[in-house]
Image: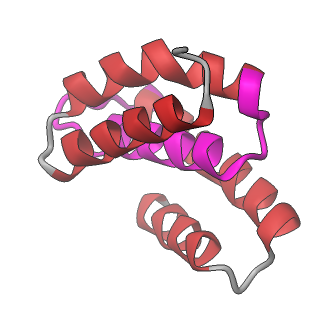
Amino acid sequence: SRDNQNTFLAALNLIIGYVNHTQFDEARTVLREFLPAARRKLGPDHDITLTMRRNEAIAVSQDAAATQDDMVRAESILVDVLKRRRRVFGAQHPQTTNDQHWVGVLE
């Protein structure tokens, strides 16, 4: 099934690979396909969903074609992800500190 945790994890790994290689359009394409389903099936506070959202913000904000509106949207996503991650996983969790880093990059 396309709506199970292993599928979402595989999609996340693909998204991260695209982001790490600055292939932001490709990352956003995979995100459009899988992020809504991940939110629905795993929930908005699941680690996979939150990491997809962080990578969505990175793909938007680090794209050379990013507009000011894109930057505002990316920062809004990251602030929400950080708030959720702190609540669910705690301030010292490695993913929380990674989210904090990216919020600082966009501020």
Question: Residue 41 vs residue 75: left or right?
Answer: right
- On the image, the x and y values in percent for residue 33 come to 45, 13
Residue 58 colored magenta? yes
Image position of 4 with respect to 89: above or below: above
Q: Would you say residue 26 is visible in this rendering?
A: yes
Q: Which residue is drawn at 70% across and 86% down?
A: 92
The secondary structure making up most of the magenta span is: helix
- On the image, the x and y values in percent for residue 107 come to 50, 62
Question: Residue 98 vs residue 82: left or right?
Answer: left
Q: Residue at x 12, y 48 (%)?
A: 21
Residue at the far front in the pictured view = 1
- On the image, the x and y values in percent for residue 95 come to 57, 70
Residue 66 colored magenta? yes
Residue at the far right in the pictured view = 87
- On the image, the x and y values in percent for residue 35 come to 55, 24
Specify start and end residues of the magenta stretch as a single range. 41-69
Determine the image quadrant of residue 106.
bottom left
* Front residue of 18 and 105: 18
Q: Would you say residue 74 is visible in this rendering?
A: no
Q: Which residue is drawn at 51% across and 40% down?
A: 52
User: Total of numbered circles in the picture?
Assistant: 0
